[in-house]
Amino acid sequence: MTPIETGESILRYIDHISEAYSANYDRIGELDRQLCDLNHIIEFTPMDIQKGYKYAKQIQDIRRERRALKDGNEMLKPMYEFLQQGASKAFINGFANALNRAKQRERALPARIYTPRSQAFQEGGEVKACENQ
């Protein structure tokens, strides 16, 4: 993996933490609304054993999905909160800028030209022995 690929991966992982936490939070809210609807259906609908089982199973499935999302957010929360701080946002922006500069350098590398620094290599491109003094 190249340094640029590593930098891009770091930024993708940082984005994933923020996106996953927010998506989980939104989905948990939707599941809460579904549970509320199911509770009202149970409250106001006459039902038999089959309907009761069907609603109980729906509640169980929703609560299990909700629990998995909440557990995921419990793990993501410390990282998410850290990434929301001003210093972290400054780091992310600075890192993204540094990555862009590294990409520019990578594109420039194939066109680089070396200029010899010693007199021995400046004349004619041949190696000349240094004269003893």
Image (cartoon, rainbow, N blue to C red):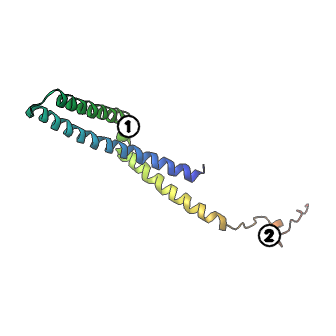
- Residue with the mark numbered 1: 76
Q: How far is the residue under mark 1 from the one under mark 2?
A: 59 Å
**SS type, badge 1:** helix
Residue found 55% across the figure and 52% down from its top: 5
In front of the other: 74 or 83: 74
**SS type, badge 2:** helix
Q: Quadrant of residue 103?
A: bottom right
- Of the numbered discs in the image, which one, if any, rests on residue 2? none
Q: Residue 25 at x, y = what percent?
A: 29, 41
Image height of 126 relative to 57, above or below: below
Image height of 57 relative to 95, above or below: above
Which of marks 2 and 1 precedes in the sequence?
A: 1
Q: Residue 82 at x, y = what percent?
A: 37, 40
CA neighbours of label 2 inside 10 A, class few (<14), some (14 to 19), many (20+): few
Name the amino acid type tagged 1: Leu
Which circle, 1 or 2, is nearer the viewer?
Answer: 1
In front of the other: 82 or 40: 40
Q: Is residue 98 left or right of residue 26?
A: right
Residue lying farthest to the right in this orientation: 132
On the rendered image, what quadrant is the C terminus found in? bottom right
Residue found 17% across the figure and 31% down from its top: 51
- Residue with the mark numbered 2: 122
Image height of 127 relative to 37, above or below: below
Q: Is residue 36 left or right of residue 65?
A: left
Q: Quadrant of residue 79?
A: top left
The answer to the question of whether label 1 and label 2 lie on touching residues, with beta carbons closer than 8 A, is no
Q: Is residue 104 left or right of residue 114?
A: left
Q: Is residue 104 left or right of residue 118?
A: left
